[in-house]
Image (cartoon, rainbow, N blue to C red):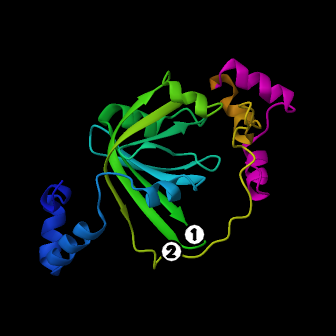
């Protein structure tokens, strides 16, 4: 891919207006690749979260946080990256977009070093990909064909210290705690039967105020 193919007309117009077109071309030539090299692979697979950007067929974007165990995204080859979709709120905003338009952007970030890597490409979403076995409790798998991978300047990343892994990350058996929001009384009729049973096992429904109190105490 050339720089002119990498940058859109809108991006080029902004570069020209602000006098950065030559700089943008130099940056592209220096850091952008259509494959994931060993350094980027090592960084990506050392992360336990990333941010996922997708767009729907109307051009409306959304971005979401995706967390899991270390290695939640796996580089199968220099041009192929996979990652799972775990149980959520049932909206499937990101997964629906990815399936509909086949476009996605990923941001992998280390807030302790700091450092970050961006990956963009075309993707498919599957519920029966053999690689799903890599991720216990995952309901879908995204397979991305990489179009660009590049590092980003880290100077504006505020340093944060990782404290602990979320207890909701599925274990090797695919087990995870029942989230508090699925105990809210107003959503019980909309939940699948398996989740309604788990609500009862956890002590029954709670009110929205009970849920807010749990959130304030750090219980999700």
In the image, residue 112 lies at what x, y percent? 61, 72
Magenta segment, principal secondary structure? helix
Q: Nearer the viewer, residue 9 or 77?
A: 77
Residue 218: in magenta span: yes
Q: Is residue 59 above or below residue 108?
A: above
Total residue callouts: 2
Question: 206 left or right of 30?
Answer: right
In the image, residue 145 lies at what x, y percent? 34, 40
Q: Which residues are magenta?
A: 191-220
Do the residues under discs 1 and 2 have CB atoms within 8 angstroms?
A: yes
Disc 1, SS: loop
Q: Which mark is residue 169?
A: none
In the image, residue 9 lies at what x, y percent? 12, 60
Q: Which residue is mark 2?
A: 157
In the image, residue 86 lies at what x, y percent? 59, 36
Q: Is residue 65 above or below residue 197?
A: below
């Amino acid at each position: 891919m050339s720089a002119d193919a990498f940058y859109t007309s809108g991006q080029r117009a902004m570069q020209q207006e602000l006098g950065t077109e030559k700089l943008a071309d130099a940056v592209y030539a220096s850091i952008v690749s259509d494959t994931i090299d060993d350094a980027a692979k090592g960084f990506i697979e050392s992360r336990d979260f990333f941010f996922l950007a997708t767009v729907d067929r109307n051009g409306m974007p959304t971005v979401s946080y995706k967390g899991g165990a270390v290695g939640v995204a796996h580089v199968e080859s220099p041009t192929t990256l996979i990652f799972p979709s775990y149980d959520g709120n049932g909206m499937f905003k990101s997964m629906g977009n990815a399936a509909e338009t086949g476009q996605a952007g990923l941001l992998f970030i280390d807030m302790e070093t700091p450092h970050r890597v961006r990956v963009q490409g075309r993707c498919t979403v599957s519920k029966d990909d053999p690689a799903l076995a890599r991720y216990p409790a995952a309901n879908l798998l995204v397979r991305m064909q990489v179009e660009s991978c590049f590092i980003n300047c880290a100077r504006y990343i505020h340093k944060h210290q990782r404290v602990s892994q979320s207890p909701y990350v599925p274990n090797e058996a695919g087990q995870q705690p029942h989230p508090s929001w699925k105990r809210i009384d107003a959503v019980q009729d909309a939940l699948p039967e398996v989740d309604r049973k788990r609500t009862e096992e956890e002590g029954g429904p709670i009110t929205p105020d009970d849920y807010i109190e749990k959130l304030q105490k750090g219980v999700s």
